[in-house]
Image (cartoon, rainbow, N blue to C red):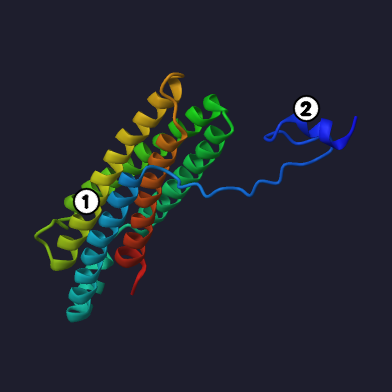
Amino acid sequence: MTETELANETGPGDAPPGAQAAAPPGLHQQGDTSMWVFVIGDLFIFGAYFVIFMIARSEHRDAFLAAQQHLNLDAGLVNTLVLLTSSWCVALAVNAARVGDHRRATNLTLLGGLCGVVFIAIKAYEWISEIQGDQTITSSDFFMYYYMLTGVHLFHVALGLVILGVVVANLRNSELRRVSIVESGAIYWHLVDLLWVVIFALIYVMR
């Protein structure tokens, strides 16, 4: 068979035997654009919160340091590890969804959500302990910022659990499965993790 006959048989879109298709990989935007817009907007809002906190801390450094001693550093550290583990599970879930392993993706997403529930439980215990020690939102400027920042973040965690629930429902429905839904859920959950790492550093660690 001549080269011309081989080309006619394979067609313009088929590669001849022994040839390798070397199409360059295309760019893939992870998640939906609307989720990215929301995440970027949220980062700007929290960025403003962090700047305000830092200005207040610089003006009343000694008072903030004294109030900071009442925090449970161990609880904050454990919660940080819990959220980091959760984000790791959700990232693995995205990888599983991309290769079509929906059962593993579902289990990993559920495990990530369970870590979120543990985070809320630890934070509730911490809040109760602080309030019982008379460290309330009106006790000092430091605790006003503490409850505000951790409270707004806690709302984001709760919303994130709802989003992860949507991801699980999507993974379990063979007719509605979309990798972009799993990716969007992961993007939001990583935002929750990132915000907590910054809050932990500013509120608990920085001296």
Q: Amino acid at mark 2?
A: Glu
Q: Is residue 59 left or right of residue 27?
A: left
- The reply to whether discs 1 and 2 touch (Cβ–Cβ < 8 Å) is no
Residue under numbered circle 2: 9
Say which quadrant the N terminus sits in: top right
Closest to the observer: 166 or 33? 33
Residue at the spot 83% in from the left edge and 30% down from the top edge: 5
Residue at the spot 9% in from the left edge and 60% down from the top edge: 138
Q: Residue furthest left?
A: 138
Residue at the spot 26% in from the left edge and 43% down from the top edge: 124
Q: Is residue 120 left or right of residue 171?
A: left
Say which quadrant the C terminus sits in: bottom left
Q: Amino acid at mark 1?
A: Val
Residue under numbered circle 1: 152
Q: Earlier in the sequence, mark 1 or mark 2?
A: 2
Q: Which mark is residue 177?
A: none
Closest to the observer: 122 or 27? 27
State the SS at label 1: helix
